[in-house]
Amino acid sequence: MIRWEEKSIIQAAKEKNINLQLMDAKEFIFDLDEPNSFPHVVLQRCVSYFRNLHSTAILESFGSKVVNSFYVNWITGNKLFTTLLLKKNKIKTPKTMLSFEMDSALKALDKLGYPSVIKPIIGSWGRLVALIKDRDSAKALLEDRMHMFPLYQVFYLQELVKRPPRDIRCFVIGDRVVAAIYRISGSDWRTNTALGGKAVNCPITKELEEIASEIVKLLGEGFYGIDCMESKEGLLVHEVNNTTEFRNTVPATGINIPGLVVDYLKKLAKC
Amino acid sequence: MSLECLDCGGKIDIPKDAITGEIITCPDCGASFELVKDEKGFSLKLAQVEGEDWGE
């Protein structure tokens, strides 16, 4: 699937006389017993997380350098794994609890206090991220999820951070921050631009650069979207996006993200 | 070049630099389609708009 983002990268490559080879995961047959020849450098842009993760595993096993790597995919595609990594490395992130059953989830929520937030451990665009305002709502919501696919019965519960009606997405290419936007809530409490959040340029502060630098140290160079919330304790990182979208960021910041991505791929191809 | 929307019959302009796999949205009804190219040229295929594991 070619979205605005992929098309702009293709266009940027053309302008820089770089011949990109497009690969469509839908058409691929990976014969794991036959020698395969894949490009030296691959920019992974599968919109499906599971296709992304598994095709990256195969491409890496056959020697390709994939942006982003399997390790990055594995960690950042799962909110729990990301939170564990952030907490272990003392990067500030919201208070989070996890449980697998309704009763234990209710106890966790009593401890976190209401309102709190529940998120699927895998998922994007704010899908199924819900604000839980009280115990009755929690019971109803958790009961529904107990009838859903097991993935949604991993209850990832988080404090509702007192923040302005916006968060910050900071874009890293290679090892440096190239752009940042405020994502300002629209009609929804969530800030996702997929849900109507508005993108506005955000200055790249020293604090953002330090956070990004810590995350790059943990995950390695790549192409990331780091999401942060402004709190009285400073910026809290709540997510790292692995196949980040930037269609709203380019006009808001004036930064040529597709061009910078192509430059980064070119640099990797020379290594 | 333009194609007829499979949902509402509206006119969808195909950009000159269109490529196969590109997502095109009908300006009239908002339906999304994937562009497919064969020897006859481009045609539209209903696009999956969102999957359970889709996103960034």
Image (tube, rainbow, N blue to C red):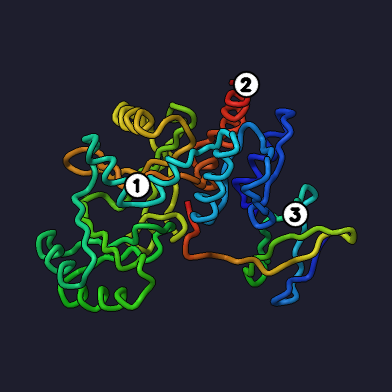
For the image, the number of numbered tags is 3
Look at the image and tell me in which quarter the C terminus of chain A lies: top right
Q: What element carries label 3?
A: loop
Q: Is mark 2 on a helix, strand or loop?
A: helix
Q: Give x and y (percent) for residue A267.
A: 59, 23
Q: Is A190 located above or below residue B9 in the figure?
A: above
Residue at the image point whose x is 51% and y is 47% from the top: A245
The residue to which callout 3 is attached is B20
In which quadrant of the rendered view does residue A213 lie? top left
Q: Is mark 1 on a helix, strand or loop?
A: strand
Q: Earlier in the sequence, mark 1 or mark 2?
A: 1
The residue mark sitting in front, 1 or 2, is 2
Look at the image and tell me in which quarter the N terminus of chain A lies: bottom right
The residue to which callout 1 is attached is A239
The residue to which callout 2 is attached is A270
**Alpha-carbon span between mark 1 and mark 2:** 31 Å
In which quadrant of the rendered view does residue A92 lie? top left
Residue at the image point whose x is 63% and y is 53% from the top: A25
- Residue ranking furthest to the right: B40
Q: In the rendered structure, which amino acid carries the disc numbered 2?
A: Lys
**Alpha-carbon span between mark 3 and mark 2:** 29 Å
In which quadrant of the rendered view does residue A64 lie? top right
